[in-house]
Image: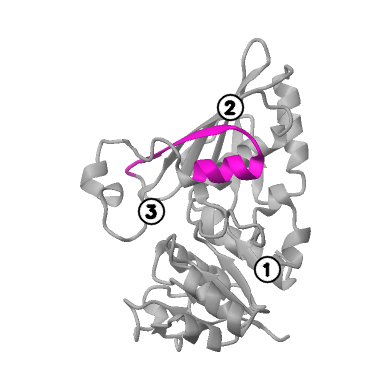
Amino acid sequence: MTRKTIGLVGARGFTGRELIKLIRHRDELELVFASSREFAGKPVCEMAPEADAALMFEALGPDDVAARGVDAVILALPNGASHTFVDAIDRDCPDTLIVDLSADYRFTENWTYGLPEIYGRDALKSAKRISNPGCYATAGQLAIAPLKGRLDGRVHVFGVSGYSGAGTTPSRKNDIEALKDNLMPYALSDHIHEREMARHLGCELSFTPHVAAFFRGIVATTHLSLKTPIARDELIALYSDFYKGESLINITSDIPEVRDGADQNGAVIGGFDVSEDGRRLVIVSVLDNLLKGAAVQAMQNLLIGLGISE
């Protein structure tokens, strides 16, 4: 078997660490470079023990990455940092598959938005440019998508994430002392994940993110109104049918908690509270922001784009 060659740019972050582990466990894939300016010259296995002992971190610019001519490049960079790498790959090796984890291309028409459980796999199979959804946006869309077309008015999503979602660059949102005995709201309106969910679901939506003192995981509590009433049993059956065959989505009648999604590859959707009139609903979704909210989803998109079974 000829293994597909993979390059990872932005390898030193929390998501990069998860991606290295996931790639290593796939016989069909070979990680041939991991780029990090801060860690350049250090063995990758010092950060990620699963990595090949001979693999070293490198400081690679856009032209260096394009010159490698790998089968696929995963960009795990901060928002606003992907464009130069994409431009270089577009110029020198347009057939290289790119999976971008930033928000830079989630609103770009000629990129494929990769949330396979909702938007399908057919477009991903022929895609060369795939934008990975945001972590909150994944949790929210998974909770809302089965009701698309039945919604009446604005959807409201209240989200809480672990502080790993704030990345490795020091800030108040990943400061343990600032978070101690605290719940920190931020980006009270027009958060990029709010616009992302609204765009791809085609609905009016409000979203308020918060960060708490736990390290990983997301809980999204979503309030929706329907045009016509629905019974709770019918609602649960609708979600079970919508996600039938999706091994990463677990539907439960219980109210899921952060710990139910943390360290898990998939998402849990539950709660399914229905008002007395059957038109107002509350649905809770949980997932790991570093896994289904980032690295696992990127792996799904990578494998589908390369024609490999998930």
> Compared with residue 92, is residue 15 higher up or lower down, i.e. above or below?
above
Secondary structure under the numbered disc 1 in the rendered image = helix
Secondary structure under the numbered disc 3 in the rendered image = helix
Which image quadrant for residue 167? bottom left
Where in the figure is residue 161, as x and y percent of width and height? 42, 44
Q: What distance separates the C-alpha of mark 2 from that of mark 3?
A: 29 Å
- Amino acid type shown at disc 1: Leu
Considering every residue shown, the one lying at the far top of the view is: 276
- Amino acid type shown at disc 2: Arg
Tag of residue 254 = none
234 relative to 99 in the view: left or right: right
Where in the figure is residue 23, as x and y percent of width and height? 57, 72
Magenta span of residues: 193-213
197 relative to 41 in the view: left or right: right
The residue identified by callout 3 is 164
Where in the figure is residue 146, as x and y percent of width and height? 71, 36
- Amino acid type shown at disc 3: Ser
Q: What distance separates the C-alpha of mark 2 from that of mark 1?
A: 35 Å
**Colour scheme:** one colour
Which image quadrant for residue 296? bottom right
> Compared with residue 246, is residue 39 higher up or lower down, i.e. above or below?
below
Q: Nearer the viewer, residue 197 or 255?
A: 197
Q: What distance separates the C-alpha of mark 1 from that of mark 3?
A: 25 Å
The residue identified by callout 1 is 303
